[in-house]
Image (cartoon, rainbow, N blue to C red):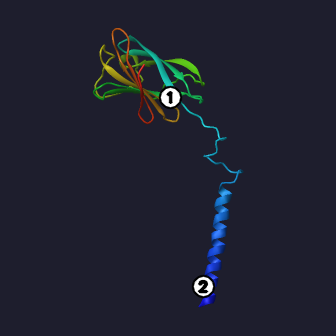
Amino acid sequence: MNRKLVAIAIVVIVVGGIATEALAGLMSPGTTDTTNPSTPTYVDSVAMESITFSSNSSATLKLRQDGNATTTFTTYKVSDGSGDFYLLTNWTSPTITPSTAFTADILIGRSCPSCTLSGNSFTFASGQTYVISVYTMDGKPFSFQVTRNQHGYHITLSVGFGATGHP
């Protein structure tokens, strides 16, 4: 009986040693380690500097890439307070490099024949609040809550996990 216990103990020690070596090898410097601080991390961080409404169906956003990633937007969505929205999925923005500001023309209604409408049609009306979301090539959204006022604007930035900023 003692020989069986010794044999089992040897097997457990050998298998445990092999498993430990295998796990240690997974974390060796020759492999990719996502916790390694030398691995570059690219961050999209887009902020809205301003917005102007040139008509009831056109808004121009001045956006800035504050992150260290190069970004291209492919889609935008404009939602009103009732949940209606316009969606443009074949939007072409310029490639935005880090620390670069750019303008984004956002069209809705008859000014955007390629947009898809969900719900009731709407226009940018004074005193009304809208959410304008722009999406990167990989689907990451940057959303900006805007209110069209006669004299100025109010912005609420909402990115990722609910961060909010007020100018």
Q: Are marks 2 and 1 in contact (CB under 8 Å)?
A: no
| Disc 2 secondary structure class | helix
Circle 2 crowding by C-alpha within 10 Å: few under 14, some 14–19, many from 20: few
The amino acid pointed to by label 2 is Leu
- Give percent across and percent down for residue 87: 40, 27
Give the spatial CA distance, label 2 vs label 1: 65 Å
Q: Closer to the camera, 17 or 138? A: 17
Image position of 111 with respect to 21: above or below? above
Image mark for residue 165:
none
Residue at the spot 66% in from the left edge and 62% down from the top edge: 22
What residue is shown with label 1?
A: 74
Write down the quadrant of residue 43 in the picture. Answer: top right
Q: Which amino acid is tagged 1?
A: Thr
92 and 52: which one is in front?
52
Mark 2 = which residue? 5
**Residue 97, position as x, y percentages in the image:** 60, 24
